[in-house]
Amino acid sequence: MKLSEYRAQWAFSPLNEVLAGMVGTFALIPEVIAFSYVSGVSPAISLYASFVISIAIALTGGRPGMISGAAGSIAFVVGALVHHHGVQYMFAATMLAGFMQLCFGLLRLHVVMRFVSDEVRTGFVNALAILIFSAQVPQMLHVTWHTYALIAIGLAIIYLVPRLFTAIPSPLICIIVLTLITIFYPMPVRTVADLGALPSGLPQLTWPHVPFNIETLEIIFPYALAIAAVGLLESLMTAGVVDEHTDTHGNQRMECTGLGVSNMLVAAFGGIGGCGMVGQTVGNLRYGGRGRLSTFAAGAFLLLLMDVLHRWFALVPLAALVAIMIMVSVSTFAWGSLRDLMRHPKLSTVVMIVTVLVTVSTQDLAAGVVAGVLLSGVFFAWRATNMLNVKHERAGDEETYEISGQIFFASSDMLFDAVDFQTSAKKIVIDVDRATFWDITAVAKLEKIVSKLQARGVDVEVKGLRARQHDIIAEQSDEPLLAV
């Protein structure tokens, strides 16, 4: 990236960027604290991690306007590691995962994201919206009517205030108003202080206290690989959401390397690994966050809340945070996809629905995306299989098979079944000029057809083998018959 482009990404309206970043912080905190319990670590570890990631990714990442922090998908991955081996092994696994992500970016492997279809992306954001909303449900159970009243007031402020003025993001106004109400009119509602001990002060630079030997590597490597894969997947998907919202293009390679650097720093400061967070990013975008400053502000404001405003932040009612997260979930959900259920091809709709169902049932965004990608691949193979066409003609003692379409592992049997091995013809011409061979299975099937016909004394001619089009045949075949 050119220096001028990098500087321009810091040059958006400072006030809008800072205020939007503050909204992102308030949307970040309840989810980060909730996921800390999933992973078995203290809220301080998750909050410190979110601060470090936000600052580091703002400086080194490739997608301005994106909020990153200690995400739920990472928490689910490291939970078992923390339970069986302790947080020090989690720090070591996070550092190794960051190194893997750094290498992933340097090697330009981000191109694998091209295999994630639009249906999977839509299912991803819809499932995330459902998970965000469902995460708020426990805060609305077994509570007094005061909580529901505050949530209603908060939602009214969030959605109605922007009709009057937009100088200050309405979620910040929601936080201030509801906090003042509970201070001046005490009522039985839960506050941020009830979520657990909050950190105070700056995080300390440290190093994972684990034995540096092969046994430790055997323990942490599977978790590090999972953290790296899930983090990259979720961050690049989130970056895609920002691209969609802003009609701009981020640098995916730089995002991978930036995430790797961020997670290595997180481990060095004693935090849990993190990645891009779609819900919080949507909230940031909604209120004007477009550049790196909004991401930086989200981390800086989080540190300010933890350190300088520690006592006041503890007084914020959870109802205010719930109202913000409900707004985020509504903004995240792709409502147009409901209309598209009847308009889009059925197979595309199935992919989207499966992505949502797997993600919601497992509460694992990576699992849902992987399921969607695999299903997309299966459906694509099915469509490509149906494109294979074999035209058979006979003239005297000569038969011709004219083959067109895609020949690969799923369609090669159709080609094999189309050939009559009991033929009385003395010569058979197999014309593959309009066909493309994609894998070794297809090549092997063609070789098998030729060898079977030749074994019956039939003269076989294969036409149309061009090195440019059929490189795999030239590379894999040792038979002169298929040489090109």
Image (cartoon, grey):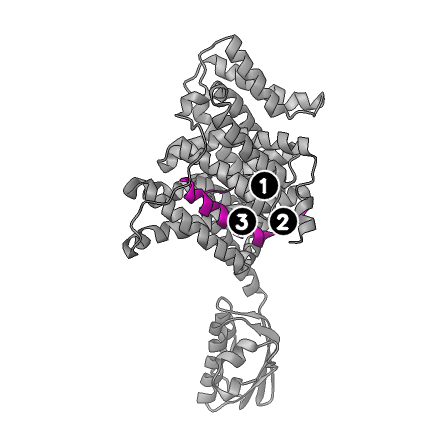
* Badge 2 element: loop
Residue of label 1: 66
Q: Which mark is residue 437?
A: none
Residue 272 versus residue 191 in the image, above or below = below
Q: Quadrant of the C terminus?
A: bottom right
* Badge 3 element: helix
Residue at screen point 47% across, 51% down: 370
Q: Nearer the viewer, residue 103 or 270?
A: 270
Residue of label 2: 250
Q: Amino acid at mark 1?
A: Met
Where residue 439 sits in the image (x, y, percent)?
50, 71
Q: Which portion, as a residue range, is magenta?
A: 248-275
**Between disc 1 and disc 3, whose residue precedes?**
1
Where residue 279 sits in the image (x, y, percent)?
55, 36
Q: Are marks 1 and 2 in contact (CB under 8 Å)?
A: yes
Q: Is residue 262 left or right of residue 436?
A: left
* Badge 1 element: loop
